[in-house]
Amino acid sequence: MKLNIAVLAGDGIGPEITQQSIKVLKAIAERFDHEFLFEEAVVGASAIDLTENPLPDATLDLCKKSDAVLFGAIGDPKYDNNPAAKVRPEQGLLKLRKELGLFANIRPVRAFERLLEHSPLRPDRIEGADMVIYRELTGGIYFGEKTLSEDEREASDLCVYTAEEIERMTHLAFEAAQKRRNKVTLVDKANVLETSRLWRRTVKEIAKDYPDVELDFLYVDNAAMQMIINPKQFDVILTENMFGDIISDEASVIGGSIGLLASASVGKEHALFEPIHGSYPQAAGKGIANPIASILSAAMLLEHFNLLEEAAIIQAAVDKSLEMNICTSDINKESSYSTEKVGTFIEGLI
Amino acid sequence: MKLNIAVLAGDGIGPEITQQSIKVLKAIAERFDHEFLFEEAVVGASAIDLTENPLPDATLDLCKKSDAVLFGAIGDPKYDNNPAAKVRPEQGLLKLRKELGLFANIRPVRAFERLLEHSPLRPDRIEGADMVIYRELTGGIYFGEKTLSEDEREASDLCVYTAEEIERMTHLAFEAAQKRRNKVTLVDKANVLETSRLWRRTVKEIAKDYPDVELDFLYVDNAAMQMIINPKQFDVILTENMFGDIISDEASVIGGSIGLLASASVGKEHALFEPIHGSYPQAAGKGIANPIASILSAAMLLEHFNLLEEAAIIQAAVDKSLEMNICTSDINKESSYSTEKVGTFIEGLI
Ligand SMILES: CC(C)[C@H](C(=O)O)[C@@H](O)C(=O)O
Ligand SMILES: CC(C)[C@H](C(=O)O)[C@@H](O)C(=O)O
């Protein structure tokens, strides 16, 4: 198979982790006789530095004509601490999601057997936990109108959803549940929000098409608690953009490190793969960032193109590195390996 | 001291837990020669059943003329499963918060030594954790304009904040930090939301008046993760309404049971005290609900009127019940005590 892959490594630790995924994908291409072509482009703070635009047209064009995007991370403290900044790295990612129509963000979360001792949660609570979070990615309060009054003393953000946006997400989540344990949990705040009530109504309606899938509902506050008390109850979680952002970062504690969590963002025509962790600027350039989330995102990329054997080989190689404790310091405190060493070890197993 | 206390026991387990707090407050009154007068009124689903209004005028009037409100819980599954219901129990609580001007919700969270083994988190992660969450309670997306299109296929919720709303909350949080460990963490999503950027700007400005208090910032997704990875880092958390709802329910896992968490909601003229747990309808009438969150809310009521010794006696009695394992089944699985037994035990220690 021939794949054109746009590489948007971004800021902070983005470049060093993405480098490891590329190594691994190249090894797969060689072993299976695929042709993977990588083309790089700038995004985020590094793009602002070069072009004053967090998503330059050239980057967007490259993504549009590629088969898939391999994304690193974006964000820089110099913007975080400047709430008045008019241009911010995050706008690059948000615009990219919107322009590519990546409406569904898919985040698998599971407890790795070898890392049970590593989680802040008790092993018996998480052993066997295995869920996937379907987060709506191009709607809600992220993309609604924002206002700031002239005297800069009143601000607003609008959260909007349409039934169409909810329907297409819901189908994806239910189809995923059918391939898993046949359960979907809708996370919302239907006791307060009108948009949540629209979600609840719409999802209930669609659920009728999937009689083999059980549907239940949790308010987001309760879900944030249940995620820790009893994560094993979840199979597929379906939720809107902001709640998905919060719940999926929280869920990362189950795996023992946010450095392990991959994600796929898909739409009708495009797909983007990125670790759920951020740019972690304090670690940039130090060779301590965990490349596994990025490498597992590369595996999700292969799965997306139905290269299932290839994806499984990467997953097995990652499991091996965890098992043998060839890990960065977030996981292996005593004798940690560098970002590059971990990447090379996994590459070597392909 | 003479206090007129409005009792709004509400739905589900609300009445049975509130009954225990009243017993305890009466014991305090007797011991310290105070006069506490209790007057009851309906709210929530039970008020809808009686009057078709989740907050009848008589209830609101009673609250307005009382010195404090002791609140139970509201909510009923028959409304949750009916997204089209025009009247809902939650409206009663939200309207009450707004009408009484209860803009600050204060939720202390700490790890109880005796319950370390009970939390889903590892004991070493939580031992010594001690924080208080200052959640803005009468603004944000809870109270902004809501719309539903005529064809019912598009909905919206508006999140609005003004600098004034943020300023008054911020002062309370910084004053609280000065009496604690001098640290405030603002939880927001300033990389995406305009309202969050207003929060960040405003809080930074106010922070200048409190040079002895350290201020830091966390995005809400990261905060949801940090709450579990390292809860000891938090002293005072300051946040907007929706984020506070999610983060504080999540934080309840630290104490080992949501049945332990009390809250105070205060404004310029009024104050209301309620457990953070909900109406837990599945448990209603079974005598298994934990009354401690409500009893500790009663202690917060006394603190509010500067009855510090009285409040401390209740807290000590609660600690004793935990220590001796005179607890409901959420905490004491083997030989649990009923709601009423726990209440009577604590009352007996006053
Ligand atoms: C960087 C930020 C805008 C982004 C988001 O909130 O969506 C990130 O937290 C994520 O989850 O991908
Ligand atoms: C019942 C509900 C409206 C309420 C809220 O979301 O504020 C509750 O969850 C709380 O936290 O007090």
Image (tube, coloured by chain):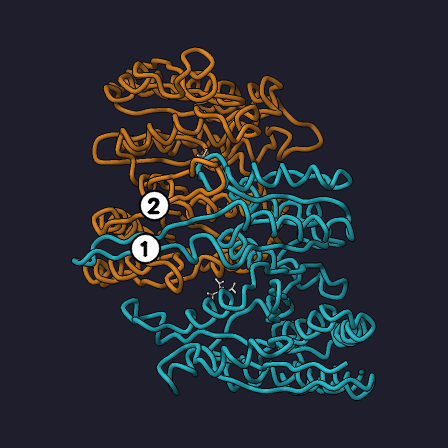
Chain colours: A orange, B cyan
Residue B309: image quadrant is: bottom right
Q: Residue at x 44, y 11 (%)?
A: A50
Left or right placement of residue B280 versus residue B29 in this view: left
Secondary structure under the numbered disc 1 in the rendered image? helix
Residue matched to label 2: A140
Instruction: Report the chain holding disc 1.
Output: A
Q: Which residue is drawn at 34% across and 73% down?
A: B87
Q: Is residue A140 something one can see in this rendering?
A: yes
Q: Do the residues labelled 2 and 1 touch (CB within 8 Å)?
A: yes
Q: Is residue A298 something one can see in this rendering?
A: no
At label 1, the amino acid type is Thr
Say how many tags the image has: 2
Q: Which residue is drawn at 78% across and 40% down?
A: B212
Residue A265: image quadrant is: top left
Residue A193: image quadrant is: bottom left
Mark 2 on the same chain as mark 1:
yes
Residue A139 placed where, x, y %? 31, 42
Residue matched to label 1: A195
Residue A258 placed where, x, y %? 54, 38
Up-down: is A282 above or below A202? Answer: above
Left or right placement of residue B82 versus residue A191 in this view: left
Q: Of the residues under marks 2 and 1, which one precedes in the sequence? A: 2
